[in-house]
Image (cartoon, rainbow, N blue to C red):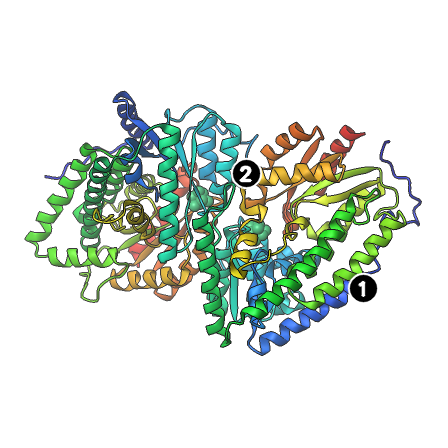
Amino acid sequence: MVQMSTPLTYDALIAARHQEVQELIAAEHGLIGYIYPHAPLELFLAHDFTPILLWAEPKIPSAYEASLQTFCCAYSRNLFSQRSKEHMPPLNAILFPGGTCDSLQNLGDVWRARFPDDTVLRLTYPVANDDMAVTYLAEELRDLSNHLEVILGKRFVMELYQKAVALIAEFKAAAQFIAVARIIRPSIYPYFEYARLIRKFLTAPSLNSLTEIESVATHLQNELRKEQCLPTTEALRHGLLAGHIPDQIEIQSTDEPRIMIIGGMVDSEGVAFHFDNAKANADLEDLEIAFDLLSFTYRTTFTKAPNLHFDPFTEMAQSILSAPAEATQEGLPSRLTFLRRVFEKLKIDGLIICEQSFCDPDQFEVPDTLKLAEQKKVLSVRVPLDPEFSDRARLEGRIQSFLETLTAR
Amino acid sequence: MAPDATTTPKEKAYRKLNTSKLLRDTMTLHILSTKQASQQGRLAWVTSGFPVEIPVAFDVTAAYPEQYGAIVGSEKCGPLLCGFAEELGFSQELCSYARSSIGSVKNPQQSPLTGLPTPQALLACNNICGTVLSWYEAVSEMTGAPVYLVDMPPLEGDQPSHHLSYVKSKLEGLIEFLSQTFNQDYDEEKLIQVAELSNEAVSLWTRALEACRHKPTPLNCADRFLSMAPIVALRGTQQAISFYQAFLAEVQDRVKNNVGAIVDEKVRLLWDNIPPWFTIYNFFNTLAKKGVSFPADSYTHAWSANIPRGEILESIAKVYSNVYLNKGLTAKIDKMCSLIKDYDLEGFVLFSVRSCKRYSLGQMVTKEEITRRTGVPGVIIEGDMVDSQQYNEAQVETRVEALLEMIV
Ligand code: SF4
Ligand code: SF4
C-alpha cells in the first residue's frame, strides 16, 4: 500500500528538509552542499561525504546587498543570504559549478571572497556532451577527487564508490519508474508525493529514503502489471532514458486535461505544493500534473548510471552529461524537437512554464517554448517565480485561472 | 587640485581625434562588406571573444552583434529594439545586447542600418559569458543559420592540459563546421598568416593603449571605446592594421607634443565595464569639463594578447581561453590593480551593468579589494549599456561627484 503523507504547509516542507539534515549531522556525516543539480553524488559518497542539495529558504531576510546586485539570480541571492545569516547547515565544503550560468559562476567567486573560511569547491562543466567533453569532465572530476583527498583528508574508496553507484542507480530507477507510471496514468500517484520523495532523497541520500521511494515504485509496478500496462511503462522509461519517446507509446485519452510543467532550477516540491493549492481553490481536486521537465526531478533522475566495469571518472562524467533537456547546455533545437514529441506523444493539453527571476537559461528558453506550445495547440501559462515563492497568492491565482481555462476547453 | 569647470564656454574640454574620419570610413567599408558577404553566402555573426582568425582564414566575413548593440545604444533606440524582443517573450531581465539583436532580427526595417545582414552561420564562444550561447540559439531559431559553439570552460588559475585539449578539439570541430558550411578546405598556412595580421593589429592597439600612461593621457575612455571597433571586427585583416598604424601615429604625436585627450587633465580615473552607449559622449565629456580623464579601462584592454608562435590551433586555444573575463574575479581584480598602478590613476568607476551578470556581479567585492590593495577610492554606478530606461543620470552624477570629492 502506498503511504500518502498528510497535507503540509510550505513551511512544514522546508522544516522537513532541516530535519533530514539534522539527522545527518547527528550521525556525524561529513556534508558537502551543492547547488547545480548535476553534481557527482557518487564521488562525494566514495569519499565518505554525504552530498546535500541546498535549497532556497522562504523566510530568510535578505543579506546579499553588500555583495551582490539585484540582477543576480534570485536563487543565488537567497543562498548567499542564508550563508550570511549563518542559516546554512555546517558543511565541510560547498560545490559551485563553473560553466553553467553566469550568476553561479560569479557567485562562487564572491562566496570565496566573503567567506574565506569556507571550503569552496569548483567543478567546471563543458557545455557539450561529445567524447571530448566526457574526457574533459572526467579529468575535472579526477581533480576534484584529488582535492577532496588533499583538502578534506578523505580518499576515494572503491568500495564506497560501488555502494554509492548502486544507491544512486536504484534511486533513479525508482524515480524514473514513478515518473513514467504517472505519465501513463497521472492519477496513479500524486505529483506532489513524487516530487517530495525525490527531494527527500536528494536532501539526504540514504538507504531509508531509498526504501521509501522504492516501495512506491514497487507498488505502482504491481498496479500497472494488473492493468497490463507494465511493458508500455518500461518501454517509455527506456525510451526517455535514451532521450526519445518510442513510436509504440500510445497514451489513452481521458476526460482530464494532461498538464505538464517545464522550467529549470525551480523547487519541484514547492511548485507541486502551490499547484495543489491552486487546484483545490478551483475545485479541481482530480487534476494532476502528468509530466515535468524540471531540473531537480526529471532532468536529475533520467540519467544513465555509471558502469562499474569501467573507469569511475569517465563513467561519472558520462552519467552527468547524459542529463536531458538542460537549458544550461548546448542544443536548443534538440530540446525543442524533444518537446514537440512530448506534446504529441504524451498528449499534453496544458503547459505551465516556470520562469525563475533573473535566470538567463530559463528566460531565454521561454519564447520558443511558448511558440511551440501555440503551434501544437497546447494551452500555456508563464509563471514568473522567485525561489522563495514569495508572492504565493499571485502564483496560485495564476495557476488557478489557467486550470479553469484549461478544463473549460 | 580641485576639479572645476575651468574651460571657457567656446573651448571644448576634449579633443577630437583626427583619425575619427578614417575610423568612420573603415567601419563603413566593413559594414558594406558584411552586406556583400551575406549576399554571397559568406557571413557569420561572431561573439567579441571568438577566435575570429579561423573564420577569416576561411574567407568568411564576420559581423558582430555586440558591436551592433553599441550602435543601437548610441542611436538611442535600445528601448525600441529591446521592446521588439520583449514582444516575442524575451524577458526584460536579459542582456540588452541580446534583446536588441533579437529585436532587430524581428523588425529590421525599424532598426539602425536595417539590422545586421542575414548570417549563414552563428559563431559563439563562451569565454566572455554564458549568455551568448542562448542568445545565438534564439537567433538561429529565427534565421535558420546554424550555431557553432567554441566551448571554453572558465578557468581557475593556470590552464590544465585537459582544458587545452578540449578547447583544441572544439577548434578542430570549428574547422570542420566551416569547411562544410562554406564548402571550403582548411588551409593552415592561411590561418598562420591571418594570425600574424591579427597579432600586428593587436600590437598596434596595445601600444596605443599603453601610451595612455602618459600625462596627460592622449586618449580618453570614449576615444578608446570608439576606436576599438576595428580590433573587434577586423582582427586578422590588413584594414585593421592600416587603421591602427594611423591611429597609433596620432596617439604618439599627442604624447610627443604633450597634447591630452582632454584639455585640462586634473584627475585620472579607471573605468570598468562596457560604457552606457546612449550617453557615452555626454558622460565622459561632462567629466572632461571638470578635468577628469579616464586613461585606462578594463574593457578595451581585453583585446591585447598575441597569438604565440607554435602549433597554431594550440596557440589560439591558449590565448582565447585565457582572456581574463574567463578567469574569474581575482584575475579581473589583479588586472585592474595593475592598471591603476601602471597608469597612475587616482580612483575608479565601476559601471554595474544590469544586462551583464558575468562582467558585473562581483563588483562590490572588487571595489573593496581594489581600494584595499591600491589605496585609491572607487564608486559603483548603475545602469545599462543599451537600455537607457535602466539608467538614472542624476543618481550617476551624484555618485561620481561623491568620488571626486574623496579624491580632491
Ligand atoms: S536559477 Fe538559473 S541563473 Fe540561477 S543558478 Fe540556476 S540556472 Fe543559474
Ligand atoms: S551578458 Fe555581458 S558579456 Fe555577455 S553578451 Fe551580454 S553584455 Fe556581452
User: Residue lying farthest top?
Assistant: A26
Disc 1: residue Cβ within 8 A of ligand 2's nearest atom? no
Depth check, mark 2 against mark 1: the one in front is 1
Q: Which chain contains the residue that carries disc 2?
A: A
Residue B359 point in image, percent of width and height: 58, 45
Depth check: give the residue in front, A211 or B53: B53
The tag on residue B21 is: 1
Residue shown at 65% from the left, 29% from the top: B373
Q: Residue furthest front?
A: B310
Q: Answer whether residue A357 is visible to the viewer in this image.
A: yes
Residue identified by numbered label 2:
A70
Q: Is residue B30 above or below residue A271?
A: below
Q: Nearer the viewer, residue B316 or B266?
A: B316
Residue B82 in picture, x, y percent from top left:
58, 56
Q: Secondary structure at mark 1?
A: helix
Q: Amino acid at mark 2?
A: Thr
The image quarter in which residue A272 lies: top left
Quadrant housing the C terminus of chain A: bottom left
Q: Is residue A66 above or below residue A404?
A: above
Quick check: can you spot residue A356? no
Q: Name the kind of residue labelled 1 in the image.
A: Lys
Task: Return the residue nearer the eye: A356 or A113.
Answer: A113
Provide the secondary structure element on which disc 2 rests.
loop
Q: Is mark 2 within 8 Å of ligand 1?
A: no
Q: Residue B4 location, x and y as percent?
A: 87, 36
Q: Is B337 left or right of A50, judged from the image as shown?
A: right
Q: Along the horizontal axis of the image, is B179 left or right of A30?
A: right
Relative to A73, B57 lies left or right? right
Kindly identify the residue that appears in the image at 18 percent across and 51 percent down. A181
Q: Tell me how far mark 2 sits from mark 1, CA to CA.
A: 41 Å
